[in-house]
Image (cartoon, grey):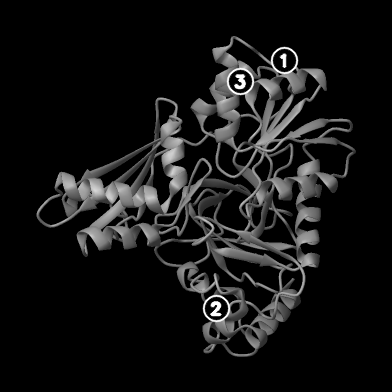
Amino acid sequence: MTLLIEQLVQYARQNSPFYAALYRDIPRSGWQLRDLPLIDPALYWQQSQTLSSWPALTGPIIDGHVFKTGGSTGNGKLSVYSREEWRDFVRVFGQGMGSQLNPGDRVANLFFAGDLYTSFLFIHGALAHSPVPVCEYPFTGAVETTLLAQAIETHQINVLAGVPAQLLRFASQLLERGQVLNSVTLVLYGGESLFEEQLSMLSLALPNARYASVGCASVDAGLIGASTPDCLLGEHHVFDGDALVEIIDETTGEPIEAVGQTGVLVVTNLQRRLMPLIRYPTGDLAVWCEPTDTKQRKFALRGRASQGYRVRLGTLSLFPEEIGGIVKAHLGPASWQLLLARAEGMDRLTLRVAPDGGLSNAVKGALYTALLEKYPTMNTLSQSDLLRVDIACHTAHNLTFHPRSGKLLRVVDQRSYVVQTEQPA
């Protein structure tokens, strides 16, 4: 493992201007992983829209795939895989995902496609590498509820794979019609966490289903963790040999090894050379579930980091640095933070601002309009009663700060994550 990391770092610093600058003060040998600086995501993605001159890349894009990590087509960050890297990505993930499946399972792929979005294509590829034979029904997340329910019964589909927001929409519409699907035995969710109240609603419409993560990965970071039947909800195994996972203390920056201590999830991808990711903060909080010497050690996700560069709400990705730019344009150097919560069956996003002199209705309206213009999906989710967006005026001292460091928390996540006390069946 050590040799592989050394080779990756050497290749990155020789071929990528970004890493050459990042590792300028790192000796050629004798260093340890913890000696390497963490990637600053804002700097890393700064020029990703111009792929021909993006400093993070180690060479030209000759073959492969270009995907988007968030935002609209015009401003989303672009993530690049060579053809071989993409094949390795879906193969390894599919082998982990396949551990949740049984031979002959019929899987409805309800993830989303189009506009450089990754998830549908990714799960389609992963299912093709399942170690057990399964049959995929590639509906996408845009399938109409009535047609999907009919197809599940007609084709005896027993596995649903999708993002919680789409699965909840489907379950809600089933319940409105008084319909229950007893034939579904497994629900694989991905892209966001599953919350306790969401699990209760899904169970009403799909009473015989077991619920499990499809696995933990992202288009930017690549492989993160595998979900297997011995994992509780929110838990994942590390991909030994393909990705290196660290949990880092938010305040000190030191690696955490103790079980149960929360820190920022940091990933080093050992597969990728065209767009290397070395000590990349995912923006998630996590804890170790097992001691250091455990093979394929398990970790559990615990929400978003306070300084996380991306916030996930359903199918919506928000970038705090972009929101900071909007706030500055309308309020100047005002303090602000994002509050994430769930209530009455929907996600709630509150932008807390603390401007000098208060907040007029006109400026509040302009700030709200600017948010919707930056993130059109926000408006779509709001109109579908899946998201409530508010702007709240505070005094600076009434915002939430880190209890130890005293730093302003950029993201405050108050959503209640599912915690199981028993092993899944």
Numbered label tally? 3
Q: Counting other residues with Cα less than 10 Å from the Cα at mark 3, is it few (<14), some (14-19), or many (20 or more)?
A: some
Precedes in sequence: disc 1 or disc 3: 1
Q: Residue furthest left?
A: 357
Q: Amino acid at mark 3?
A: Ser
Q: Measure how far apart labels 1 and 3 are at the Cα level.
A: 10 Å
SS for callout 1: loop
Q: CA distance from mark 1 to mark 2?
A: 53 Å
Towards the viewer: 363 or 169: 363
Which residue occupies the foreground of this view, 107 or 214?
107
Q: Residue at x 59, y 22 (%)?
A: 171
CA–CA distance in space, label 3 to label 2: 47 Å
Q: Which residue is mark 3?
A: 203
Q: Which residue is mark 2?
A: 35
Q: Residue at x 43, y 50 (%)?
A: 375
Position in image of residue 406 (x %, y %): 27, 59
> Pointer 1 and pointer 3: residues touching (CB < 8 Å)?
no
> Dot 2: few (<14), some (14–19), or many (≥20) neighbours within 10 Å?
few
In this picture, is 114 found above or below 102? below
Would residue 386 appear left or right of 227 to someone viewing this image? left
Residue 38 visible at all: no
- Pick whichever of labels 1 and 2 is earlier in the sequence: 2
Between 361 and 349, the residue placed more toward the observer is 361
Q: Which quarter shows the C terminus?
A: top right
Q: Which mark is residue 182?
A: 1
The mark that comes first in sequence, 3 or 2, is 2
Relative height, residue 132 to residue 52 (above, below): above
Q: Secondary structure at mark 2?
A: helix
Kindly identify the amino acid type of the residue bearing the numbered disc 2: Asp
Q: Please give left or right for residue 283 compared with residue 180 in the image.
A: left
Measured as percent of width and height from the top left, residue 172 is found at 55, 21
